[in-house]
Image: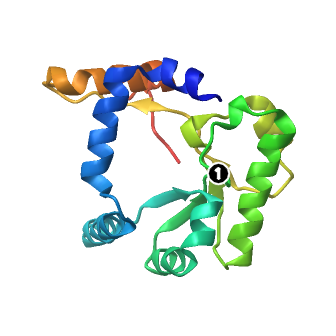
Amino acid sequence: MNVKSWYEKRGLKFVYQRGLALLDRYGLSSRKAFRRIEACLETLAASGCAPTFPTPGYVVERYPTLIQQIQKSGAEIAVHSYHHIDLSELPFNDAIKQLTRAVETFERFGIEAHGFRCPYMGCNDELLNSLPAGMFDYSSNRAIRWEPANMPASVSLFYETLHDFYHGSSAAETVCVP
């Protein structure tokens, strides 16, 4: 996907608001993101639950020890391609290479992965049906939309843009299963 197409799907106001939200959430270094992951793990563990973190292969390569620790803490690490790019925008063989490279990276660093989610849920039936047998036990590439009650107008643009982008099914009408 080129930059122009990426921008046209989102618009200036969304990009600005999303950029501010990401900066607030993650900061300029990885330290804040790591603290958020630890807090998530602790919060869910207190309820007897564990998250799944779809993780790009390049992140595993950059932070293998951290990803190993997250997995040892009980979280599932799922493949999220090698680069965080929309696989539906790539030629078919390049999309397969992205997933294969990610799996090889996970294996090289001893990260167990059973499932995958494509970045931006950029997955199609051709890709799913062409994956090598046994590569993944499951795929989580179906968007489901939860609509907050009494949503403020400032948040509405974010949800509308995500709905237009992902075409999620309403949680009120769809069962969400792994």
The structure residue drawn at horizontal position 28% and vertical position 72%, both measured from the top left corner, is: 42
Q: How many marks?
A: 1
Residue beneath the point at 73% across and 73% down:
107
Residue at position x 50%, y 26% in the image? 166
Q: Is residue 97 left or right of residue 145?
A: right
Question: Residue at the spot x=30%, y=57% of the render?
Answer: 27
- Residue 155's spot in the image, x, y percent? 22, 27
- Front residue of 37 and 173: 37
Give the class, few, some or many, for how many residues have Cα within 10 Å of label 1's Cα (few <14, many ≥20). some
> Relative to 121, is 102 above or below?
below
Residue 1 pos. (x, y %): 65, 29
Residue 7 image position (x, y, % from top left):
49, 24
The picture places residue 9, in percent across and down from the top left corner, at 50, 20
Residue 126 visible to an observer of this rendering: yes
Q: Nearer the viewer, residue 168 or 22?
A: 22
Q: How is the image coloured?
A: rainbow
- Residue 27 to residue 47: above or below: above
Q: Is residue 158 above or below residue 113?
A: above
Q: Is residue 35 left or right of residue 169?
A: left
Image-quadrant location for residue 161:
top left
Q: In the structure shown, which secondary structural element does the residue marked by tag 1 occupy?
A: loop
Observer able to see residue 146: no
Q: Is residue 72 above or below residue 161?
A: below
Q: Which residue is mark 1?
A: 83
Amino acid type for the residue under numbered disc 1: His
The quadrant in which residue 129 appears is top right
